[in-house]
Image: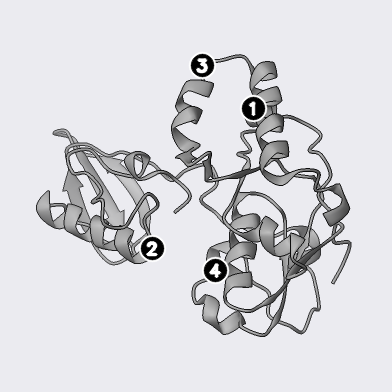
């Protein structure tokens, strides 16, 4: 995970310390399964809510794809980026290779020794690129807008907690601090294909809701020649 352990847990049960500062996929799944079990939550996966109807005597009937149930309260929390979206050049292409949205990537080992183009240098793109390099893929990243890239930790401390404070401060000084941290950690990445981002990290987040990319090895791979950057994709 890219989020600090204390910011990744649910109310009532702490995420255990054994996974370390950033929990692995397996550790977080075990935590969620234990949380549901300990709190008596009836979690139903792989079901689609087709409609929700108010009942005459109060409460709601939730109609699922294969059943229905009645609940006193209903919370709809689908998120604003919950539906994967492909750009036009990807949705209308005749590319004979394998085309995946980031949400469809599961077993990274299948990409070992393969040529992989990661399109987009946002949080998901940079994260995936670093993981793909680790499993031995030949990784190229296509960048349209240069991103703000930060490490998970700086000076031995996680950067995540500072975000909680930053949300209450003006954008301009935070943008300056962010650029200083990036320069201290990475230096000038222009020669590697990542020029300075056109906006500071907080300005872009407040304007467009775009988080900075969190680096967990990709920049090192880029500097070592184990990955490369190309420009924006026009067509496949």
Q: Can the viewer see residue 85 in this picture?
A: no
N-terminal label among 4 and 1: 4
Taking the spot 71% from the left edge, 31% from the top edge, the residue there is 179
Disc 4 designates what residue? 104
Q: CA distance from mark 3 to mark 2?
A: 31 Å
Q: Position of residue 59 (x, y in %)?
A: 18, 37
- SS category of the residue bearing label 2: helix
The answer to which quarter of the image holds residue 146 is top right
- The tag earlier along the polypeptide, 3 or 2, is 2
Residue bearing mark 3? 168
Q: Nearer the viewer, residue 157 or 66?
A: 157
Residue 202: image tag: 1
Q: Looking at the image, is 12 positioned above or below residue 173?
A: below
State if disc 3 and disc 1 touch (CB < 8 Å): no
From what the image shows, is residue 144 above or below residue 100? above
User: How far across and how far down the image is residue 15, in percent?
Assistant: 25, 48
The mark lying in front, picked from 4 and 1, is: 1
* Residue most extreme to the front: 155
Q: CA distance from mark 1 to mark 2?
A: 28 Å
Sequence-wise first label, 3 or 4: 4
Instruction: State how far apart marks 4 and 2 are (Cα).
Output: 15 Å
- Looking at the image, tell me whether mark 1 or mark 3 is earlier in sequence order: 3
Dot 3: element: loop
Instruction: Estimate how packed mark 1 is, as few (under 14), some (14 to 19) or many (20 or more) residues with alpha carbons within 10 Å.
Output: many
Disc 1/disc 3 C-alpha distance (Å): 11 Å
User: Which of marks 2 and 1 precedes in the sequence?
Assistant: 2
Any mark on residue 29, and which?
none
Q: Residue at x 66, y 78 (%)?
A: 137
Which of the two labelled residues, at mark 4 and mark 2, occupies the earlier sequence position?
2
In the picture of the structure, the residue carrying the numbered disc 2 is 25
């Amino acid at each position: 995970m890219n989020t600090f352990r204390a910011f990744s847990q649910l109310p009532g049960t702490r995420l255990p310390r054994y996974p370390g500062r950033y929990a692995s996929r397996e550790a977080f799944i075990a935590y969620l399964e234990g949380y549901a079990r300990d709190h008596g939550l009836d979690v139903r996966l792989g079901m689609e809510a087709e409609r929700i109807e108010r009942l005459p005597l109060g409460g709601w009937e939730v109609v699922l794809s294969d059943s229905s149930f009645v609940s006193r309260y209903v919370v709809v929390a689908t998120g604003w980026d919950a539906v994967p979206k492909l750009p036009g050049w990807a949705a209308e292409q005749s590319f004979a290779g394998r085309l995946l949205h980031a949400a469809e990537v599961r077993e990274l080992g299948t990409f070992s020794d393969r040529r992989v183009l990661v399109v987009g240098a946002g949080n998901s793109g940079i994260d995936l690129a670093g993981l793909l390099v680790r499993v031995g893929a030949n990784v190229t990243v296509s960048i349209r807008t240069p991103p703000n890239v930060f490490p998970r930790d700086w000076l031995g401390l996680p950067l995540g907690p500072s975000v909680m404070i930053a949300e209450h401060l003006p954008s301009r000084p935070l943008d300056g601090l962010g650029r200083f941290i990036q320069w201290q950690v990475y230096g000038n990445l222009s020669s590697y294909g990542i020029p300075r981002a056109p906006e500071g990290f907080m300005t872009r987040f407040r304007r467009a809701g775009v988080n900075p990319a969190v680096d967990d090895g990709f920049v090192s791979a880029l500097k070592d020649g184990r990955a490369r950057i190309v420009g924006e994709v026009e067509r496949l």
